Amino acid sequence: MTTGTMHARASARANIALAKYWGKTDLEHNVPAVPSISLTLDQLVTETEVCFVEQLESDVVMLDGRTTTAREARRAIAMLNRVRQAAGIQWKATVTSSNHFPTAAGLASSASGFAALAVACTRAAGLELDLEALSALARQSSASAARSVFGGFVELPAGKPGESSLTARQIAPQRHWDVRLVLALTATGPKSVGSTDAMERSRRTSPYYQAWVDHAPRWAVAIKQAIRDRNLTALGAAMEHSTIAFHSCAMTSDPRILYWNPATVAALHTVTGLRDRGVPAWSTMDAGPHVKVLCEAPDAARVQRALQRTPGVLETRIARPGPGIEVLS
Ligand code: DP6
């Protein structure tokens, strides 16, 4: 007897938020409470293969060569279930995903992971979704993943409770502005608290949360305009505010969430020092201790050298604007 299989392979790249998402208005549908804007990067690629197998008894999710725990697999299986329902199939699947960068170290692997999974599993199930529908599907698993569906500069609006079709959209393609993002890694291993749990703790307990939700849209508006104008100073200033504001929410949560380590602080000072010496460079951070520095292409090597010399910085990489999802087979 032959076993039926249906498979597809896709890739997606990480994105770094320039205007940060932190907090949800609807936990069940994973709807963000604030608008966010990101840059998809050329490096930091996730490749994912999904294979629906007729005689498989349960879903198997492999990440970087190992079988994931039930907790890790939960969100991937929830996406498979949505896709099976839409496609009218029952078959279980194997998901094989590999990251070409450190997993769960604050380099947004869930964004590229769920964007790649959305493409691979819908294709494998025989569904041909457009980019908006793929983005909405990815968002339900991880809001930042909605942005990785698109290349270049991307926005994800805030949504209302129950807005299950909320989708990201491209503001400008990758060729619009040849900036660089220099990544300074300041720790190894997974972050202390995952972003999903951390932002929910902020919403429930931080006295600064409502102020964050009230202010975040202004930074997003400024950042969108700065992208259109290719104005690095305006973008950088709003991006740094957005970053510090959401980290303030995290730090003032109960129990507190402190992602920073001494090298994080040192790297932030390195960036200020570069600006004092006339190099336009601006920092951002995600839910982890690493520092990411936005600058113009001709300054990237100098920014990288300064970060590499910063005490506690373990590794640096230079990333460029990158494309959205790709179907590989
Ligand atoms: C700090 O997208 O990982 O990186 O929707 O719960 O999966 P979930 O959260 P996630 O949060 C990313 C938070 C951030 C900022 C950002 O990327 O906008």
Image: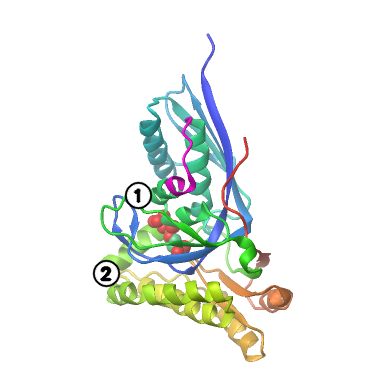
Residue 232 percent location from the top left of the image? 58, 79
- Which corner quadrant of the image does residue 277 belong to? bottom right
Q: For residue 92, say whether it is visible.
A: yes
Per the rendered image, the range of residues in magenta is: 125-134
Q: Is residue 83 magenta?
A: no
| Element under disc 2 | helix
Q: What residue did someone put label 2 on?
A: 205
Q: Of residues 261 and 239, which is closer to you in this image?
A: 239
Q: Quadrant of residue 263?
A: bottom right
Is the CB of mark 1 within 8 Å of ligand 1?
A: no
Q: Earlier in the sequence, mark 1 or mark 2?
A: 1
- Give the main secondary structure of the magenta stretch: loop
Q: In which quadrant of this rendering is ligand 1 seen?
A: bottom left
Q: Position of residue 79 (x, y in %)?
A: 41, 40
Q: Amino acid at mark 1?
A: Ser
**Image height of 320 relative to 45, above or below:** below
Mark carried by residue 165: 1
Residue 83 to residue 13: above or below: above
Residue 253 position within the rendered picture, expressed as x and y whole percent measured from the top left: 32, 71
User: Residue at left 31%, top 75%?
Assistant: 214
